[in-house]
Image: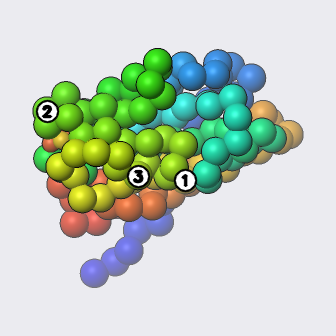
Amino acid sequence: STTLPYPREVIARLGDVNVNQPIYFNYPDNRSPCVLIRKGREVKGGVGPDRDVVAYSTQCTHMGCPVNYDKEAETFKCPCHYSIFDPDNAGQMVIGHATESLPRILLEYDEAEDTLFAVSVDGLIYGRQANII
Ligand code: FES
């Protein structure tokens, strides 16, 4: 079998990203919904000058339901069986039925272009045997 490379895709200009306002995108293909969040403070794995930008697959690792970002609690909540995931701690599950963290979308920040790119995935996207298919 062949391992395909991850695409490098523009997600947003950092200057256009407001703190705690989720930006939805697809990665590494258009059947994989994801979300980017700028936390406004340094968080684990955060990129950008303030190390505050993170991104995750929004497919719950339990059974694949789309998780929602709760702006007040600053957590991801799954409406199906109430798992909760922490964007400040690498997508780790806080409570619930899932056994895996939310897959992290690895980002790079290009300072010259003030642009955030998605470049890879850490963790297996729900329902897949490989992230690149
Ligand atoms: Fe998310 Fe079950 S699918 S908790």
Task: Depth check: give the residue in front, 42 or 54.
Answer: 42
Name the residue beneath numbered marker 2: 80
Please tell me whether residue 5 is drawn above or below residue 98 in the rendered image: below
Name the residue beneath numbered marker 3: 92
Q: Callout 1 environment at 10 Å: few (<14), some (14 to 19), or many (20+)?
A: some
Q: Marks 1 and 2, how far apart in space?
A: 26 Å
Query: What amino acid is at disc 3?
Result: Gln
Q: Callout 3 environment at 10 Å: few (<14), some (14 to 19), or many (20+)?
A: some
Q: Quadrant of residue 13?
A: top right
Give the residue drawn at x 17%, y 49%: 97
Query: What amino acid is at disc 1?
Result: Leu
Mark 1 or mark 2: which comes first in sequence? 2
Mark 3 or mark 1: which comes first in sequence? 3
Q: Secondary structure at mark 2?
A: loop
In the rendered structure, are the residues bearing label 3 and label 1 in contact, judged by CB atoms less than 8 Å apart? no
Which quarter of the rendering shows the C terminus?
bottom left
Q: Marks 2 and 3, how far apart in space?
A: 18 Å
Please tell me whether residue 129 is drawn above or below residue 67 in the rendered image: below
Name the residue at the right extreme.
112
Residue 106, numbered circle: 1
Please tell me whether residue 128 is drawn above or below residue 60 in the rendered image: below
Q: Quadrant of residue 25?
A: top left
Q: Secondary structure at mark 3?
A: strand
Q: Which x, y percent locates residue 15?
A: 74, 23
Q: Tell me: is circle 2 under 8 Å from ligand 1.
A: yes
The answer to whether residue 59 is visible is no
Query: What amino acid is at disc 2?
Result: Cys
Residue 14, numbered circle: none
